[in-house]
Image (cartoon, rainbow, N blue to C red):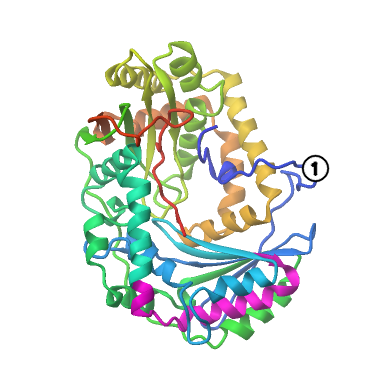
């Protein structure tokens, strides 16, 4: 199944669904705002006496500039390394002693921190989060240690993973003029020169209640959550936030091609078209149709790429498609994969282009369309079985700026997508003018760069960097 076929299939957890809510149930979220501007969103789920607590900050790599790329992620690491009241690492130790677990993640659009714990200990989580919202110590020794950790992450995840390196370069080529081009983990040269003063300025610039959203899902009463939020966050002062310049891009005027030379044993192809997200699109029906288009290409073994390019012609050992519409900026609609033995990257590109061209011609059956929509509905049911991913959905929608109403609108919009809609967006957006093509050219023999199990590689990129 492709990654993030649509909002409803986003972050699907394939768990048993015996206790899951019906996909027809209204997804109700109680919404509040503290006097200091902090948003509080609560979803009741009383199936177990547990709770998921997440604090989302609307800052990520799209807010960074050259010289400090990766600073959002480095700050995420530092948020666990001590406050005026806690020594380094003690935050997680406290959560663990109470039987919970915690972590954080950074993306292009946001940074978020979470705990999963007994509902009775929600107040503890909020107390600790409020403490580090304004009380971070940022000790120089801890900064140097965590910076080395991040540099090692980059080496392992990007420099030593040639397909990830290829996609990173593709994204940079597809967005030549805006911060959207920068990797969440940061460019290597910027990480080498990042200072603790850079991190401190980032912290004091963006970590404020009026740039944060608290999301709580679980065995709770919304009014009680609001009372706890006021108790622990209510005295935090709002801050004048920097103005955000639109991450606008120059208009694409033609196909961009690049080759990435790296130690690897197999070639790899990544193709990506610049397309709108739910935030930037003029007509949301285009986004719904793009998501269905992604599902037609890569929505399981019966989808076109798997059926025709992998199993049918045998040109690819693995290939797929990806589109994620939840973003603050435009996004990429990607296809790619690894050619099979005795086949070339050129052959694979022609085969993938042929699948896209068939959709541009409107060669879509009713059965195919219904299969994708059925997959989307099934994904929605699975997702609702997890408190964590309910919270993820709430936090992402709120932080990118589309709000909770977008969910029901999306579900209804997907239901209405027709074959003609898919053909229309394929013709409108999947054009050579919007296309960037990156080819991994293997150099030498290395233990790195082996094919992934499905051979697809990171066609969707690495948008989330987890601590």
Q: Can you see residue 198?
A: yes
Residue at 62%, 83% (x, y): give it. 230
Q: Does the magenta stretch include residue 137?
A: yes
**Residue 82 appears at what percent x and percent y?**
47, 79
Please state if 410 lies on the left or on the right of 142 as rendered: right
**Residue 96 appears at what percent x and percent y?**
64, 68
Residue at 40%, 47% (x, y): give it. 462
Q: Could you say which quadrant of the image residue 110 lies in?
A: bottom left
Nearer the observer, 362 or 101: 101
Residue 102 vertical position relative to residue 188 in the rendered view, above or below:
below
Q: Could you say which quadrant of the image residue 187 lies in?
A: bottom left
Please state if 372 lies on the left or on the right of 15 as rendered: left
Nearer the observer, 19 or 311: 311
Q: What stretch is highlighted in magenta?
A: 116-143
Neighbourhood count class around disc 1 (C-alpha, 10 Å): few under 14, some 14–19, many 20 upward = few
Residue 130 vertical position relative to residue 27 in the rendered view, above or below:
below
Residue 13 vertical position relative to residue 231 in the rendered view, above or below:
above
**Residue 195 appears at what percent x and percent y?**
26, 72
Nearer the observer, 242 or 348: 348
Q: Can you see residue 185?
A: no
Q: Quadrant of the N terminus?
A: top right
Residue at 50%, 64% (x, y): give it. 112
Count of labels in the image: 1
Residue at 51%, 34% (x, y): give it. 2
Main SS type for the magenta part? helix
- What SS does tag 1 mark? loop
Residue linked to disc 1:
18
Please state if 267 lies on the left or on the right of 78 as rendered: left
**Residue 36 appears at what percent x and percent y?**
51, 82
Please state if 135 lies on the left or on the right of 50 as rendered: left
């Amino acid at each position: 199944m492709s990654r993030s076929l649509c909002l409803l299939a986003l972050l699907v957890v394939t768990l048993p669904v015996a206790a899951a809510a019906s996909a027809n149930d209204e997804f109700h979220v109680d919404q509040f705002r503290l006097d200091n501007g902090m948003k509080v969103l609560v979803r009741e789920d009383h199936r177990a006496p547990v709770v998921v607590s997440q604090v989302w900050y609307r800052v990520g790599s799209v807010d960074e500039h050259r010289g400090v790329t990766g600073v959002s992620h480095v700050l995420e690491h530092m948020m666990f390394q001590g406050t005026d009241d806690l020594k380094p690492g003690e935050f997680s130790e406290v959560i663990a002693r109470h039987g919970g677990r915690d972590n954080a993640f950074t993306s292009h659009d946001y940074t978020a921190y979470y705990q999963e714990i007994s509902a009775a200990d929600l107040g503890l989580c909020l107390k600790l989060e409020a403490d580090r919202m304004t009380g971070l110590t940022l000790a120089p020794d801890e900064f140097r240690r965590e910076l080395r950790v991040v540099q090692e992450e980059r080496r392992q995840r990007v420099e030593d993973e040639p397909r990830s390196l290829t996609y990173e370069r593709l994204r940079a080529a597809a967005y030549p003029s805006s911060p959207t081009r920068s990797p969440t983990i940061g460019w290597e040269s910027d990480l080498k020169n990042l200072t603790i003063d850079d991190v401190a300025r980032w912290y004091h610039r963006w970590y404020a209640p009026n740039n944060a959203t608290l999301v709580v899902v679980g065995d709770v009463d919304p009014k009680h959550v609001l009372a706890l939020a006021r108790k622990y966050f209510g005295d935090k002062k709002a801050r004048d936030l920097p103005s955000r310049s639109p991450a606008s891009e120059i208009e694409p005027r033609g196909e961009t091609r690049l080759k990435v030379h790296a130690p690897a044993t197999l070639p790899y192809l990544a193709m990506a078209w610049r397309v709108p997200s739910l935030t930037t699109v003029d007509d949301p029906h285009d986004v719904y149709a793009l998501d269905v288009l992604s599902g037609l290409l890569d929505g399981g073994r019966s989808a076109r790429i798997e059926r025709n390019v992998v199993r049918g012609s045998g040109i690819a050992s693995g290939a797929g498609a990806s589109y994620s519409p939840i973003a603050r900026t435009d996004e990429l609609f990607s296809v790619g994969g690894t050619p099979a033995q005795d086949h070339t990257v050129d052959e694979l590109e022609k085969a993938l282009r042929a699948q896209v061209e068939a959709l541009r011609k409107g060669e879509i059956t009713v059965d195919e369309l219904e299969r994708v929509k059925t997959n989307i509905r099934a994904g929605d049911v699975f997702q609702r079985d997890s408190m964590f991913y309910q919270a993820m959905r709430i936090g992402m929608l709120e932080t990118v700026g589309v709000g909770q109403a977008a969910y029901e609108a999306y579900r209804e919009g997907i239901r209405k997508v027709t074959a003609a809609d898919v053909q229309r967006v394929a013709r409108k957006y999947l054009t050579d003018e919007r296309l960037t093509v990156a080819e991994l050219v293997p150099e030498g023999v290395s233990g790195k760069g082996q094919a992934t199990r499905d051979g697809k590689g990171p066609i969707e990129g690495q948008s989330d960097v987890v601590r």
